[in-house]
């Protein structure tokens, strides 16, 4: 009977340790503002675009498929958007 109780306690402790480890791991990787350990704001739009597998090109900015009328600029295609500034890129790419 005592061995059974010890085994149950051991199993519960292992579950608690596993959950604590998962919580710690989640906390470590949950910062969406980093890319491979580098803070996203430290990279250019072109660097982030390439890392995310998007296409960087020169053309006028487009938001939701509609040209903004601003002059052509070097920017990244994110869905139906062509963005040239970092803040908009981070917002649209979910970083």
Image (cartoon, rainbow, N blue to C red):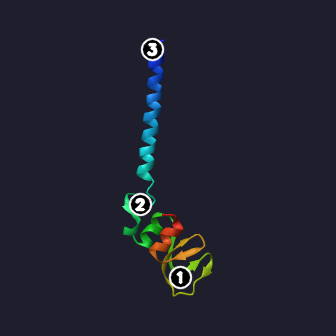
Disc 1 versus disc 2: distance between alpha carbons? 27 Å
Few, some or many residues within 10 Å of mark 2 (<14, 14–19, 20+): some
Disc 2 versus disc 3: distance between alpha carbons? 48 Å
Determine the residue positioned at 57% across, 87% down: 69
Determine the residue positioned at 41% across, 45% down: 24
Few, some or many residues within 10 Å of mark 3 (<14, 14–19, 20+): few
Q: Nearer the viewer, mark 2 or mark 3?
A: 3
Q: Are marks 1 and 2 in contact (CB under 8 Å)?
A: no
Question: Where does residue 5 sit, x and y in percent of width and height?
Answer: 47, 18
Determine the residue positioned at 37% across, 57% down: 37
Sequence order check, earlier mark of 2 and 3: 3
Q: Is residue 75 visible?
A: yes
Q: Is residue 56 above or below residue 39?
A: below
Question: Where does residue 73 sit, x and y in percent of width and height?
Answer: 48, 83
Pointer 2 residue: 34
* Front residue of this view, candidates 77 and 18: 18
Pointer 1 residue: 59
Sequence order check, earlier mark of 1 and 2: 2
* Front residue of this view, candidates 4 and 94: 4
Question: Where does residue 90 sit, x and y in percent of width and height?
Answer: 48, 68
Disc 1, SS: strand
Q: Nearer the viewer, mark 3 or mark 1?
A: 3
Disc 3 versus disc 1: distance between alpha carbons? 72 Å
Pointer 3 residue: 3
Furthest-top residue in this view: 1
* Front residue of this view, candidates 13 and 63: 13
Disc 3, SS: helix
Disc 2, SS: strand
Determine the residue positioned at 43% across, 50% down: 27
Q: Is residue 34 above or below residue 1?
A: below
């Amino acid at each position: 009977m005592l061995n059974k109780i010890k085994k149950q306690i051991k199993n519960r402790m292992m579950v608690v340790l596993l959950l604590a480890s998962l919580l710690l791991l989640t906390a470590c990787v949950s910062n969406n503002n980093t890319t491979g350990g580098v803070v996203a704001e430290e990279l250019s739009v072109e660097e982030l675009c390439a890392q995310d597998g998007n296409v960087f090109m020169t053309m006028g900015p487009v938001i939701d498929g509609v040209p903004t009328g601003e002059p052509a600029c070097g920017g990244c295609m994110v869905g139906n958007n062509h963005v040239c500034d970092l803040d908009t890129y981070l917002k649209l790419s979910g970083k």
